[in-house]
Image: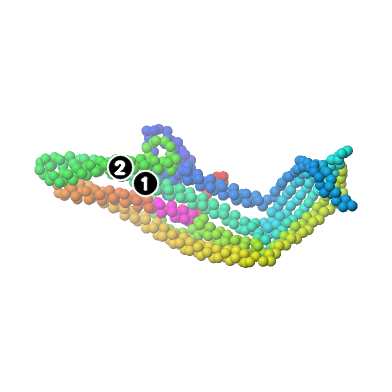
Amino acid sequence: MRQLNLLAVIFFIITSASSQEDIRKLTLDDAVKIARLQSPEALMAKHRFRASYWEYRSYRASYLPSLELDGTLPNFNRSIQRISVPEGELLSERQYAEYSVNAYIRQRIGFTGGQLFLRSGLERLDNFTDSSTITQYLSTPINIGYSQPIFKFNPFKWEKKLEPMKYEEAKKKYIEEMEQVSLTATNYFFNLFLAQIRQKIALVNLANYDTLYKIARGRFNLGKIAENDLLQLELQFLRANAAVDDVRLDVENRLFQFKSFLRIKDDIPIEIIPPSDMNPFKVEASKAIAEARSNNSDALAFVRRLLEAEREVNRAKMDGRFDAELYAVYGLMQSSIEFDQAYTNPLDQQQLSVGIKLPVLDWGVAKGKIKMAESNQELVRTSVEQEQIDFDQEIFLKVARFNMQYNQVKIAAKADTVAQKGYDITKARYMIGRISITDLNIAQTETDNSKSSYINALRTYWVNYYEIRQLTLYDFERKMLIMVDYRELL
């Protein structure tokens, strides 16, 4: 199927709107291209992808070094406090103000779940007495530290597996949603086309029955036909009038839905041009299943769901069990009553701590959580296996329908031609009085149904075409993957 490029579609929209008296002729390619460009569903798909992109960017950024500043400017305290002296403890009134500023650089270590940090800070303490103010400075030129959970659940390790997978899933999902836009546009296109064809049929039928009714009245007056035949034609003429009103309303409704989906805001009449340049090709079921397993977002979601279930089992096994954490700091610090001396000959500082936590008795709570997580993992695995089977079967059936549909279109087109010729012959025979009005009505019904069947066969072909593209993200007509430049969406 030939595709219009983006500039051609924009030019087409602008030039089509230049005159309210023109008729906008739309092919299926036109409708699909306009829908992918400006339909609400296409725009929503773009914004959903953008949200997924920035979520992934936030995840990536969380593994880059972060710089933080904090400070206290100032913290003033006037209170009575307990102080220690050689003779014991006394209560004494204190007044002081403290100021501090600190800079931190933190780096997450995803593989181990630990965190490395670098700190530099300066503090000032002003003690107020009745007669004077005593000022002291405490500097920390550099502190290097590392904290590491030893037996805890490590969410960062699982993030590294799941977040890139979620982003790939979002990219696949965007292509699928755009193929759904094409599919929806196809349905609206054929809804309008079928309504317009029915309107033409209704107008032709009205004109035919008007002519036949007038001829029948003349024949009745001459005594050549029975009154029952005249009444039958009058009834058909009245029904044809009513049908014209019904189909006109249906065309207006289908036109509104079509223009609303494509966001066409002008009042230029639209004429649907049916697809006529179909390029028949066959799709191999094995190839379609292989491409779907490789490209479809659902196939990727199967793997993600299994991995998430495995993560929850790991979480249950690690949480609430034996736990330990290592915290180590090495740095330099100095104090002085003079600011310029606070950074002179700093002293080293070391801190090392290992904390442990061991539940002694939890009455089986931890074991119960593990069993629940393992049962859920088995449930997810079973569900995924069944969904994979159903997924493959769905693709197999859609491929089978598509491969036979081109032949169905040819049969429907031939049947439409035959039915139209049959009606023309039947009408001519009725005009010379060779057949009854009942035979004419049957021929009319058959030709109307044949036209509708042909249009529905065309619709089914193109619906199947876009459904296979949506499921496999593969263009079997051109034998290539459906690609998108995601940078254009940001």
Q: Residue at x 42, y 41 (%)?
A: 260
| Above or below, comparing residue 465 to residue 261 in the picture | below
Q: Is residue 110 visible?
A: yes
Q: Nearer the viewer, residue 263 or 5?
A: 263
Distance from disc 1 to disc 2, alpha carbons, whole Å, reads 15 Å
| Above or below, comparing residue 306 to residue 258 in the picture | below
Q: Amino acid at mark 1?
A: Asn
Q: Residue at x 13, y 44 (%)?
A: 227
Which mark is on residue 191? 1
Q: Which residues are magenta?
A: 461-473
Q: For the C terminus, which image quadrant?
A: top right
Q: Residue at x 39, y 35 (%)?
A: 267
Left/right of residue 98 with respect to residue 44 in the rendered view:
right
Image coords of residue 304 (percent x, y): 56, 59
Of all residues, the one furthest to the left in this rendering is: 223
Q: Which residue is mark 2?
A: 246
Q: Nearer the viewer, residue 80 or 280?
A: 80
Q: Nearer the viewer, residue 452 or 4?
A: 452
